[in-house]
Amino acid sequence: MTAFTEKVINIILGIPSGKVMTYGQVSRIAGSPRGARQVVRILHGMSHKYGLPWHRVINAKGQIALRNDAAYKEQITCLEMEGVEVDINGEIDLAKYQWHPLLDPLER
């Protein structure tokens, strides 16, 4: 496992219930500002193995990015069960729900 992958896993595991992070935000904190697609691949391939709260990671527009209807609905259900409001278009208010850990270099 690469250092980047390990960092991504740990960052995602640290997202608290009721909060979300974006793919790009996770990749930036993990040390690869342009690695959002890598985060997607890590989530796709390792969520089950590492028990990742995959549903807490969304795109930069605050939208659920999944195209598969069943997974899309599952992500909405998981977020709503944690108190995250998802509108009819699958959008989440980042100002209200985005998690900003102290690890974020843009917050220093």
Image (spheres, rainbow, N blue to C red):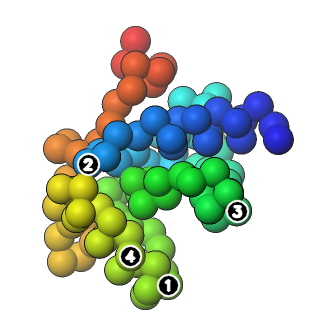
Q: How many C-alpha atoms fall within 10 Å of the one at disc 1: few (<14), some, or many (≥20)?
A: few
Secondary element under disc 1, as helix, strand or loop, is loop
Of circles 4 and 1, which is in front? 4
The CA distance from mark 1 to mark 2 is 23 Å
Q: Residue 80 vs residue 41: left or right?
A: left
- Marked residue nearer the N-terminal end (3 or 4): 3
Q: Nearer the viewer, mark 3 or mark 1?
A: 3
Label 4 element class:
helix
1 left or right of 51 in image: right
Q: Nearer the viewer, residue 27 or 75?
A: 75
Q: Position of residue 15 (x, y in %)?
A: 41, 40
- The earlier-in-sequence mark between 3 and 1 is 3
Q: Quadrant of the C terminus?
A: top left
Three-letter amino acid code at disc 1?
Asn
Mark number displayed over residue 45: 3
Query: In the shown orientation, is residue 11 left or right of residue 16?
Result: right
Identify the residue position indicated by label 2 in the image. Answer: 18
Residue 10 higher or lower than 47, as above or below? above
User: Tag 3: residue type?
Assistant: Gly
Q: Earlier in the sequence, mark 3 or mark 2?
A: 2
User: What residue is disc 4 on?
Assistant: 74
Q: Which mark is residue 68?
A: 1
**Cα–Cα gap, marks 2 and 4:** 15 Å
Local crowd size for mark 2, using a 10 Å CA cut-off: few (<14), some (14–19), many (≥20)? some
Quadrant containing the N terminus is top right
Instruction: Looking at this view, name the residue that lies furthest to the bottom.
Output: 69
Position above or below: 5 against 31: below
The structure residue drawn at horizontal position 17% and vertical position 70%, both measured from the top left corner, is 87
Q: Is residue 69 left or right of residue 79?
A: right
Which residue sits at x=18%, y=77%? 88
